Structure formats: C-alpha cells, structure tokens
Image (tube, helix red, strand yellow):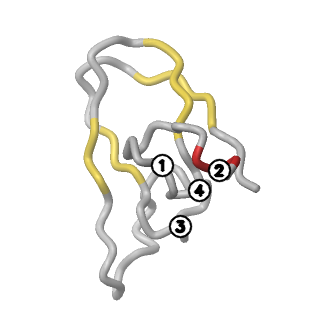
Amino acid sequence: MSVPTKIALEAGKEYYYCTCGKGKDGTFCNGSHKGSSFAPEAFSVEESKEYFLCPCQKSGNGAFCDGSHTK
C-alpha cells in the first residue's frame, strides 16, 4: 500500500504530477511516461503550505490524496 507524500508546495508555482506510476517517487513526473499514453498533470496551489500528495495514482482528487489508497 502506498502512503501519501507530505511535501511543502509554493503558491503559484506549477508542478507536474506523475500519472503513470513509473516516476522515481511516484508523485512528481520525471519523464518515465515517455513512449506511453500517459502525460503528467500540471497543478498549482493557492497557499504555500504542506500538502499530502498521492503516490498511488488512485485518488479522485488528482495529485492530492483522498484516502483511496486505503480501499
């Protein structure tokens, strides 16, 4: 089972969430999807603070953990 990744994100900065599950940390895109049908999901946050990101790619809330890894 994957556990959420707690990470500090900066407001207004663009991040790229890994949707293929092949990324080194499973959270941020590192280009491992190349040659597949997957593409990273761009996202940003409105407030600089710590967030829980989803490394299992099962969240219904994009990059943000919604607890789907427990099901």
Q: CA gap, disc 2 to disc 4?
A: 7 Å
Q: CA distance from mark 3 to mark 4?
A: 7 Å
Q: Residues within 10 Å of mark 4 (few under 14, many from 20)?
A: many
Work out which residue is located at the far front of the displayed protein and give it: 71
- The answer to whether the residues at label 3 and label 4 have Cβ atoms under 8 Å apart is yes
Residue under label 4: 56
| Image coordinates for residue 53, horizontal then vertical, percent | 52, 38
The circle drawn on residue 69 is: 2
Which mark's residue is nearer the viewer, 3 or 4? Answer: 4
The numbered mark, 3 or 4, whose residue comes first in the sequence reads: 3
Residue neighbourhood size for the residue with mark 1, other residues' Cα within 10 Å, grouped as few (<14), some (14–19), many (≥20): some
Location of residue 14 (image quadrant): top left
Instruction: Give the residue type at disc 3.
Output: Gly
Give the image location of residue 49, x and y in percent.
47, 13
Of pointers 2 and 4, the one earlier in the residue sequence: 4
Q: Residues within 10 Å of mark 2 (few under 14, many from 20)?
A: some
- Rounded to the nearest angstrom, the CA distance separating label 3 from label 2 is 13 Å
23 relative to 4, above or below: below
- Depth check: 1 or 71 in front? 71
- SS at mark 4? loop
Residue 35, quarter of the rendered image = bottom left
Q: Nearer the viewer, mark 3 or mark 2?
A: 2
Please report whichever mark, 3 or 2, sits nearer to the chain's N-terminal start: 3
Asked if residue 48 lies left or right of residue 54, the reply is: left
| Tag 1 and tag 2, C-beta contact below 8 Å | yes
Residue 65 x %, y %: 53, 38
**Is residue 41 positioned above or below 11 on the image?**
below
Residue at figure coordinates x 42%, y 43% from the top left? 63
Q: Which residue is mark 1?
A: 59
